[in-house]
Amino acid sequence: MRIPDFLNRCSHHPPVLRHSEAGRVMLAGFTMTVIADEYWPLSLYDGIMSTGSRMLTLLTLLQNHRFWTGDELSAKLRVSPRTLRRDVEQLRELGYPVETTRGVGGGYRLSAGGSLPPLMVSDEEALAIVLGLRAVTASGVQGVQDAAVGALAKIVPVLPMHVRKLAAGIGSTVGAGQAREGAPQVEVAVLASVATACRDRTMLAFDYEKRDGALSSRLVEPHALVPVARRWYLVAFDEGAGGWRTFRLDRMRGVESLPKSFGSRPIPGGDADAFVQSSIRNLPTRYEAVVRVEVPAEDARAEVGQWGVVLELEEGWSEVRMRTDDLDYVVYLLARLDARCEVVGPPELVDALRAWGRRLLRVGLPEEADAPE
């Protein structure tokens, strides 16, 4: 109803208009709410939504149902067809690809677009997204782990508290299917908090569990997260130690983001990945594996990377040296090299190779067949 029409109907009242709060006018004792340029007496309908609320509702309807007729959407939103058309046009301007079908039975649908606009999700859908991202962070899939952590850092802080608690509870009882057996798991909340602190450059306080189980309190400037062999490492400047350190996220307890920011500080060498790899190589380990393999040194270095040292020997052989707590990783590396090898040490590596050989033979042979000696 337009203001002139309303004035004509209310001619027995003095034609006095005065402004009140934004979006409303007072007319001779009647209060009207302005939505776009349509005017509705509040005495006729008290539940009219604001423009923002109405557009969010429209977006949710379009995302939850493939196709709506114009009459259906107008009825759901309690607006005129003209207002509906304006709302649809505003969604298009925001990047939502809303298609219009004209004629009898025409209506609106949300189609796939060239870019990803904001999405409206329910609590259950948000929970599913968080748990899915958590599985990706533990999967070891190259190229997507960092993206998954970045998404968690954006999603977890804005979740309703009850959804956040539910995600943490499920995450603590349901492991990621692709995670290696025995691999340490990181809580979603810890991963998201650390990633957010790295992004926002805010200080972190936490207790860190050492190899012997003792705890030490740390106050750090978090700079980068690095995934290595399905473990997450934080590269940070430790204020207490006065230097750069790496921290395993699965050993961080009581992580708290502080309302204190810090400035940019260059990571030694300029590369967080290389810094973590160097730190790991220098850590005390249970084993130092030494293996001679019939592979050119250049090919061996391509597989070993910075996790070990490769020495060139005669006649196309190389010597691989690796410090590790996990001999299974050395077995995996030797399998990838796919070449004849001689174990120099330690004896436990020979045992690990034999154990894996027996295990693979049991998998590959029929039950009635005897494994070769």
Image: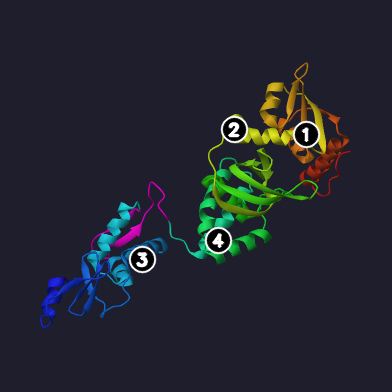
Query: Residue 350: where, in percent of width, then height?
Result: 85, 36
Q: Which residue is mark 1?
A: 323
Q: Which residues are magenta?
A: 96-118
Q: Nearer the viewer, mark 4 or mark 1?
A: 1
Query: Residue 209: where, in percent of width, then height?
Result: 74, 49
* Farthest-out residue, bottom: 12
Q: Which residue is mark 2?
A: 271
Q: Which residue is mark 3?
A: 53
Q: How is the model colour-coded?
A: rainbow
Q: Mark 4 belongs to which amino acid?
A: Leu
- 22 or 242: which is nearer to us? 242
> Alpha carbon of mark 2 to alpha carbon of mark 1: how far?
22 Å
The N terminus - image quarter:
bottom left
Task: Name above or below for residue 296 compared with residue 177.
Answer: above
Judged from the image, the secondary structure of the residue bearing numbered disc 1 is strand
Mark 4 and mark 1 lie on one chain; the one further toward the N terminus is 4
Callouts 2 and 4 close, C-beta under 8 Å:
no
> Alpha carbon of mark 2 to alpha carbon of mark 3: how far?
46 Å
Judged from the image, the secondary structure of the residue bearing numbered disc 2 is loop
Residue drawn at point x = 74 percent, y = 37 percent: 332
Mark 3 and mark 4 lie on one chain; the one further toward the N terminus is 3
Q: Nearer the viewer, mark 2 or mark 1?
A: 2
Judged from the image, the secondary structure of the residue bearing numbered disc 4 is helix
Mark 2 and mark 4 lie on one chain; the one further toward the N terminus is 4
Q: Mark 2 belongs to which amino acid?
A: Asp
Q: Which residue is mark 4?
A: 127
